[in-house]
Amino acid sequence: MQHLQELLWYVRFGLWWIILGVASSIGLGSGLHTFIMYLAPHVALFTIKAVQCGRVDLKSAPYDTILLERRPSWLEKDCLQFGPPIYHETIPFSKILQEVYLEAILWGIGTALGELPPYFLSRTGSVHTALR
């Protein structure tokens, strides 16, 4: 049962970021980009917390992120709960990137998927126009 629960969290996590990517590419009429509303704040909040705590191992699991009605567990925790700082000066960009790349990739996949319907519609329209 625990493995099924874990699998469901991964599925929710993946679907959430892919759906945000699709919503970003289709616009939903608001003009607000989900990158600005979700992905960028997530990366910024993680980076700020990592710099404050001097470490990047803040997530309890890869899916410990912003989801529909759920905040990440690391956001409210005190830095002492994570242990002593690992990085005392600066945190390498590559270390922060390793912690947030999955969200960015899933969001990018969603954005690409959202671009497919307009592409195929315009391609179909151009083929029908060329046949006339």
Image (tube, rainbow, N blue to C red):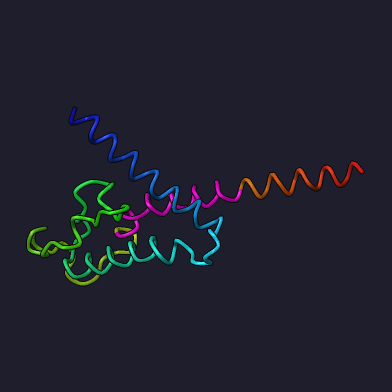
Residues rendered magenta in the picture: 96-115
Q: Position of residue 91 (x, y in %)?
A: 26, 66
Residue depicted at x 20% and y 72%: 89
Residue 61 is a magenta residue = no
Determine whether, in the image, residue 124 is placed left or right of residue 97: right
132 to 48, vertically: above or below: above
Name the image quarter holding residue 69: bottom left
Residue depicted at x 33% and y 62%: 42
Q: Position of residue 128 (x, y in %)?
A: 84, 43
Residue 99 is a magenta residue = yes
Name the image quarter holding residue 4: top left
Determine whether, in the image, residue 25 is placed left or right of residue 54: right
Q: Position of residue 40 (x, y in %)?
A: 39, 65
Residue depicted at x 61% and y 46%: 116
Using the image as rendered, state which of residue 74 and residue 55 is in the foreground.
74
Residue depicted at x 53% and y 58%: 28
